[in-house]
Amino acid sequence: MGDVLAGIHSTWEFDTDSVLIRFERGIRTPKLFQVLGERRIPYEALRSVTLEPGSRKGTVVLHAVPRPGADPLLEAAAGQLRTAADPYRLVLPAERETLADYYASELRSALVPQPDEECGDYLVTAPTVPLQFKAFDAKVAFDGKVVSFRWFWTGASSAKWKAGDQSFPVSELAGVEWRSPEIAGGHLRLRRRGPDGSPEEVSGPADQDPAAVVFGLGYGLVHESLPLAAAVLEAVRAAEPDLGDPLDGGGRRTRRANPADIAERIRHLGDLHKDGLLTDEEFTTKKAELLAEL
């Protein structure tokens, strides 16, 4: 399509095979959008498109609905995002309804009919690592390969202190459980693999589990903890072997890297570097790691 539709908190740029969503950095823009910066959504990742009245008088909303399992961010959120923080909603003034309806029709015609079952691979990339945030009881960091918990003596339970600081290689994880800090009992819990490769059963409260951190007032905020949870989910799925993947020297299956995904990640790294969020050394190191995956 090659056109642009500007909304209140974001702008959608339509291409032949995808839509690039650029989020504004204004004071009233949800902080999650500001952290995401921009996201490229392949049309094959979308299931449907609607145009509906906005929650505020005088607005309309162009809403794209992704396929199940297409986006690690929404999979991690598990329906807990507030409507205003849904990155697939483009809010527009009502006077642009006719234009929005045109783009909605164009977008529907570009969608590729897909089955409703969950996608086998993520089609939308997660936020770029490294990522970190402060929970109530720990500092959480993820570098793309290992999730680490460093306990705070002011918040961690005696059970966690006894277990000591924790490091979880992606290869040992089966998934992530994220409960929004805006809901009672907010936490992030890592799901580990059992000896047979299946997810281990979890029980007990998150404040007693060394594989979990708890949120609280001002800790584990959505725009800080959700991007990390999504990045871990993406890494876990990428690490899962597939019968169609090649074998390494030890006879183990390795995951093929998606060149388009690598290119998108490098572009995002470049933006972070340009904005001063990554040093020259961090940018060079991470770029080399991504290129090595090809």
Image (cartoon, rainbow, N blue to C red):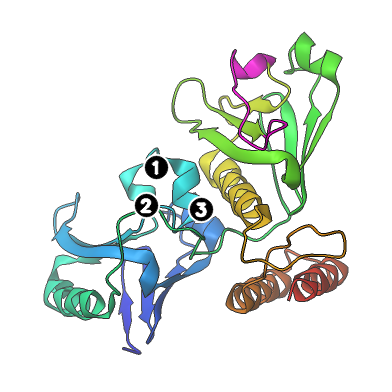
- Contact between labelled residues 3 and 1, with CB atoms less than 8 Å apart: no
Whether residue 60 is situated above or below residue 86 in the rendered picture:
below
- Contact between labelled residues 2 and 1, with CB atoms less than 8 Å apart: yes
Q: Residues within 10 Å of mark 2 (few under 14, many from 20)?
A: some
- Contact between labelled residues 2 and 3, with CB atoms less than 8 Å apart: no
Whether residue 167 is situated above or below residue 161 in the rendered picture:
below
Mark 3 lies on a secondary structure that is helix
Q: Left of 250 or right of it: where is 160?
A: left
Residue on which disc 2 sits: 86
Q: Earlier in the sequence, mark 1 or mark 2?
A: 1
Q: Residue at x 64, y 71 (%)?
A: 265
Disc nearest the viewer among 1 and 3: 3
In the rendered image, the quadrant that contains the C terminus is bottom right
Distance between the Cα atoms at labels 1 and 3?
13 Å
Q: Residues within 10 Å of mark 3 (few under 14, many from 20)?
A: many
Q: Quadrant of residue 98?
A: bottom left
Disc nearest the viewer among 3 and 2: 3
Q: Amino acid at mark 3?
A: Pro
Residue closer to the observer: 269 or 145 = 145
- The answer to whether any part of residue 264 appears in the image is yes
What range is drawn magenta here?
A: 193-208
Q: Amino acid at mark 2?
A: Asp
